[in-house]
Image: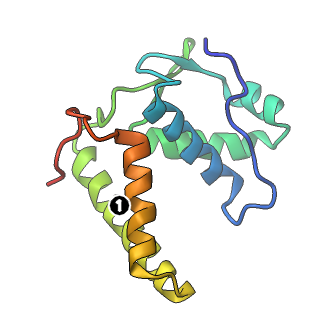
């Protein structure tokens, strides 16, 4: 198993703790720190490491399972799934992603962020996670 804790909770964040766990797990997968088939800590183990309520970790894991990011095998543990492995989930995840992007655009406009700055930030994040020569990315439907 990968060395834990790899997740850090920001008590000052406006995001709920369970969402922080969901987002950080996904980020660990995208960065390659977690790979398909890797075993992740149990709810009890992770809640103990992070010193948070087990119900919060359970909620995170339920959401990650719903999204097809992880899967629990009774008696064996919880494992990272192949990306977009849940049947029919890819199209739904693309739809959710577009909704989240829309929310971010609206929030940026509300805060008075200049369009050019927002686009620059998006491009910086894209380059950080994909790089210029990533041939593995595919165009969403």
Q: Is residue 80 positioned above or below 124 on the image?
A: above
* Residue found 63% across the figure and 44% down from its top: 21
Badge count:
1
Q: Is residue 67 visible?
A: no
Residue 76 lies left or right of residue 83; in this view the side is right
Residue 10 lies left or right of residue 122; in this view the side is right
Residue situated in front as seen by the camera: 135 or 8? 135
Residue situated in front as seen by the camera: 113 or 62? 113
Q: Is residue 6 visible?
A: yes
Question: Which structural element holds mark 1?
Answer: helix
* Residue found 25% across the figure and 46% down from its top: 90
Q: Position of residue 59 (x, y in %)?
A: 62, 46
> Which picture quadrant has residue 57?
top right
> What is the crowding at mark 1: few (fewer than 14 residues within 10 Å), some, or many (at least 20)?
few
* Residue found 38% across the figure and 38% down from its top: 68
* Residue found 53% across the figure and 87% down from its top: 112
Q: Quadrant of the C terminus?
A: bottom left
Residue 65 lies left or right of residue 98; in this view the side is right
- Determine the residue located farthest toward the right in the rendered image: 51
Q: Quadrant of the N terminus?
A: top right
Q: Is residue 136 positioned above or below 107 on the image?
A: above
Residue on which the image places disc 1: 96
Q: Position of residue 10 (x, y in %)?
A: 76, 52
Q: Position of residue 3 (x, y in %)?
A: 68, 16
Give the image's coloring scheme.
rainbow
Q: Is residue 67 positioned above or below 45 on the image?
A: below
Residue situated in front as seen by the camera: 136 or 92? 136
């Amino acid at each position: 198993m990968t060395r834990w804790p790899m997740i850090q909770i920001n008590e000052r964040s406006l995001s709920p703790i369970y969402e922080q766990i969901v987002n950080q797990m996904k980020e660990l997968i995208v960065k390659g720190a977690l790979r398909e088939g890797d075993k992740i800590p149990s709810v009890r183990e992770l809640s103990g490491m992070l010193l948070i309520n087990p119900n919060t970790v359970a909620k995170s894991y339920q959401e990650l399972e719903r999204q097809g990011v992880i899967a629990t095998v009774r008696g064996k543990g919880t494992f990272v799934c192949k990306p977009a492995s849940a049947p029919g989930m890819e199209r739904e995840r693309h739809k959710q992603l577009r909704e989240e992007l829309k929310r971010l655009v609206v929030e940026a406009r509300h805060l008075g962020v200049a369009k050019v700055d927002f686009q620059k930030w998006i491009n910086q994040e894209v380059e950080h996670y994909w790089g210029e020569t990533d041939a593995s990315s595919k165009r969403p439907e």
